[in-house]
Amino acid sequence: MLSFTFWDILSNLLLAARWTVLLSLIAFVCGGVVGLLVLLARVSRSAVLRKLSGYYIEAFQGTPLLMQLFLIFFGLPLVGIEVTAWLAAVLALTLFTSAFLAEIWRGCVEAVPRGQWEASESLGMTYFEQMRHVVLPQALRISIPPTVGFSVQVIKGTALTSIIGFVEVTRAGTMITNATFQPFLVYGLVALIYFVLCFPLSFYAKRLERRLHVAR
Amino acid sequence: MSLVKLQGIRKSYGSNEVLKGIDLTVNEGQVVALIGRSGSGKSTLLRTINGLEEINGGALEVDGEMLRPGHTNLRALRMKVGMVFQQFNLFPHLSAIENVMLAPVVVKKQNKAEAREVAAACLAKVGLADKEKSYPDQLSGGQQQRVAIARALAMQPRVLLCDEITSALDPELVNEVLNVVRKLAEEGMTLILVTHEMRFARDVCDNLVFMHGGKIREQGEPEQLFAAPATAELSQFVGSVAFH
Ligand SMILES: Nc1ncnc2c1ncn2[C@@H]1O[C@H](COP(=O)(O)OP(=O)(O)O)[C@@H](O)[C@H]1O
Ligand SMILES: [Mg+2]
């Protein structure tokens, strides 16, 4: 039987953790871009756009991320679209992230007082000018803590992609456990890696939030 | 020459008719005060004049710009009508001068250097030349309201609407704002004010409009109106407000 040292295990996990980080980053950036578009639809003046984007958000918030992954990974091939585990992971996490960010950001846009809309309207600004110059800059400021906080959910969400066979840190942990029969040690390290990735973010989010409260 | 002309303005919120046919003419350079009990429709009337409230009937005209029910292109009208709110509504993420510059740059497409010059002049006019770089939360209420006045003036409106602009201020800050308004009036700015400052209304305004239940009940010169109210509602109202 092969023997694994502690360092073998840890270095393999860390190598796999790069994929966790990369997947999180891509999902977060792409999800942010799509989320911004969904947000603009959600707060637009068109009732149709508001409704459609509302359904979109409900659909992704109302179903487990795992089902979204399964639908993309197993469902799309049935209609003739082959997707790799990597692509399915990116796609599912992007959609999931975009829906949640759009909803978080909608709350931030709505937190901008009515008077801001009225003042900019009375100055002759169009809806887009109001958004661009008055509302979004203020919404952006209050959105930072919850957005950073949500990034933790994205990182933890990437663990689910192990189920469709994408080798990130959780999947690597399973594979190493199967070879070493040391689940406690291996999964303990996996959990620690997640913690090291997530804790600074949630800590930072909490601090930002406190600072925002003091500033008010 | 008439600058603002309202004819039969009607406005309802659902089944609640708030403005029941308002006719009002304001001449260039005139200073008009709208007075009346809370809920009589003063704010609503003011807000219709720059299109913040859609009207259900009648027509209004400001310096040749017509507004009728269902009208959606309000930009031309709004560029002629400035508005100052009770709650200041300054943009908190922008400094004082940026607050004043924003609309000229965005709406009027002025270049920034030019807009900055105009904005500096407007801030100087309201006595805040030294506060250009301050953010709203670093200013007192009176200073914020004066920035808001400068912001409206920077668009070079033909008429300025003020909705209880001293009501949210601590008493000691009221006069600095009223003095700015008084100065604008002396310079010939056309003003329509909703105010509870009766002494100010009497001293500064040419015309007093008393609203009651969504209608104009009485109007005329302040001295005359205060001295001899023609209706029971106005005499009751005059009796209920203090002249301080
Ligand atoms: N957005 C609104 N929706 C429904 N009713 C309103 C709204 N704004 C004002 N009203 C009603 O219109 C009436 C007149 O209000 P307003 O113009 O604010 O009076 P004033 O400024 O004289 O106190 C009040 O009865 C008020 O409740
Ligand atoms: Mg009012």
Image (cartoon, coloured by chain):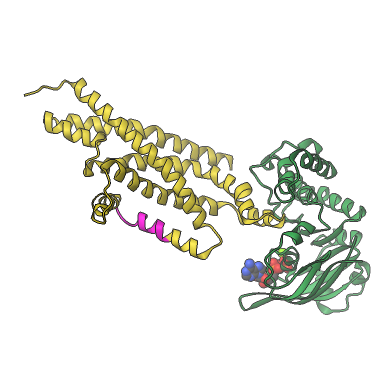
Which quadrant: the N terminus of chain A? top left
Give the vertical position of A103 relative to B58 (above or below).
above
Which quadrant: the C terminus of chain A? top right
From the viewer's perspective, tell me whether residue A32 is left or right of residue B115: left
For this rendering, which residue is in front, A175 or B197?
A175
Q: Position of residue B223 (x, y in %)?
A: 93, 67
Residue farthest along the left direction in this orientation: A1
Give the vertical position of B189 relative to B19 (above or below).
above
Colour that chain B carries in the picture: green
For this rendering, which residue is in front, B121 or B184?
B121
Ligand 2 rendered quadrant:
bottom right
Q: Position of residue A68 (x, y in %)?
A: 30, 52
Q: Main secondary structure of the magenta part?
A: helix
Residue B167, magenta (yes or no): no
Which residue corresponds to the image point at 56% horizontal and 39% vertical from the top-left?
Answer: A214
Q: Which chain is yellow?
A: A
For this rendering, which residue is in front, B224 or B156?
B156
Q: Position of residue B33 (x, y in %)?
A: 84, 64
Give the vertical position of A176 relative to B221 (above or below).
above
Q: Position of residue B119 (x, y in %)?
A: 79, 42
The magenta segment is A55-64
From the viewer's perspective, tell me whether residue B65 is left or right of residue A172: right
For this rendering, which residue is in front, A8 or B125?
A8
From the viewer's perspective, tell me whether residue A14 is left or right of residue A36: left
The answer to which quarter of the image holds residue B6 is bottom right
Say whether residue B38 is visible. Answer: no
Say whether residue B2 is visible. Answer: yes
The answer to which quarter of the image holds residue B194 is bottom right
